[in-house]
Amino acid sequence: MWREGYVRGGDTRFYVRALGSPQWREPVGAAGGVGNGASEEPRDDLVLLLHGWPQDGSSWAAVAPRLAAAGYRVVCPDLKGFGRSDTPHSGYDPATLADEIAQLIRNLHARKAVLVGHDWGGAISLATAFRHPGRVGALVVASSPFRQLDLTVSWHVPLFNLPLAPQLAFKLAGRPLTRAAIRYSAVVQTPFDEAAMDRYADAVTVDPAAWLAYYRTLSRKALVDWGIRKVRRRVRFLTSPREPHRLRVPAAVIWGEEDRVTPFHLAGRVAHDLDARLVAIPGVGHLVHEEAPEVVSDVVLDLAGPGPLDPGAARLGSTDIG
């Protein structure tokens, strides 16, 4: 059964949806029967699913039950700036975002978590794994560039960095813009019914200036880093950039072969830089966790292990997600 409520990570209240045993260290304004597990020992059976733009935590509805059926506790927060989570206009630098997710893991009463991130959720998962490796048991990144950008395809990135115009556009026409973005991003359209479209439109129209901070902070840093690397490669006397810190956790990269937002040609380089396994999904676009949830679930379970339950006994139907 899905449980919903608020859990704090640093200064941010995250609205979360959860399947599995509800162990929380700090329930805030709890709803749906969320309980306090502060008296329990911390556990290592948590999977934290982090969505991207233009979605919210409900986008994992087809992945979470498969992981819960294997015995994992699965939590799907609305990211800061989206949906029902807090929407501050600052604190979107990688260090702050990583610190908040590490604290969220603690307040979900876990020593460490398997992090699965799509799009901006992937960028946050990576920042957390590099900054707080002791809080991350394994990492799955889906359709999320790392040190790589292709602005000939990701043309929305510079547009979202313009002053005033993007938030005004989403205030005035957020719903049609969100629908158009999802229709453009997904190759497999069946998961995106009217109810899903309405949820995602709600998630990004609460306060567009908040989620735009991801583009105006993280993407600008990525562009600066990319430019510095390009210059150093061409100017021989400059010191070569250091290689990225190696991840200290097992990792996998998932990518749709027909992704029009973060094109597939970036995937191999991302997997190389992370020393991660690459899983390419044919016939799928950018929203891989909704277009191919079975594949995403299988990759997570293959990387993290079959789960606390006997794999032979785990059945999707054993989890009530009503």
Image (cartoon, grey):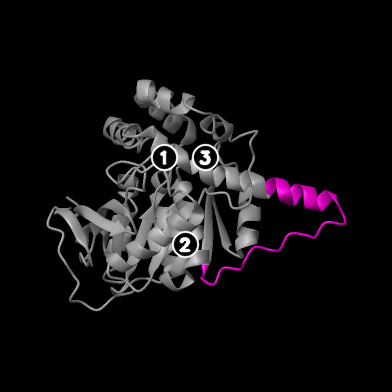
Q: Does the magenta stretch include residue 257?
A: no
| Closer to us: 90 or 168 | 90
Quarter holding the N terminus is: bottom left
Disc 2 to disc 3: CB gap under 8 Å: no
Say which element carries label 1. Answer: helix
Question: Along the polypeptide, which appears first: circle 1 or circle 3?
Answer: 1
Q: Residues within 10 Å of mark 2 (few under 14, many from 20)?
A: many
Q: Position of residue 36 (x, y in %)?
A: 16, 66
Q: Where is residue 247 in the image (x, y as percent from the top left)?
A: 56, 68
Q: Give the range drawn in magenta.
A: 226-250
Which amino acid does the dot numbered 1 rest on? Trp
Predominant secondary structure in magenta?
A: loop
Residue 211 circle label: 1
Which residue matches tag 2? 128
Disc 2 to disc 1: CB gap under 8 Å: no
Residue drawn where x is 34% and y is 31% of the image: 205
Which amino acid does the dot numbered 3 rest on? Arg
Which amino acid does the dot numbered 2 rest on? Thr
As drawn, is 286 to the left or to the right of 24? right
**Separation of disc 2 and disc 1 at Cα?**
19 Å
Say which element carries label 2. Answer: helix
| Closer to us: 298 or 95 | 95
Q: Position of residue 184 (x, y in %)?
A: 48, 30
**On screen, 314 above or below 214?**
below
**Separation of disc 1 and disc 3 at Cα?**
9 Å
| Closer to us: 125 or 87 | 87
Which residue matches tag 3? 216
Residue drawn where x is 26% and y is 33% of the image: 195
Q: Is residue 240 magenta?
A: yes
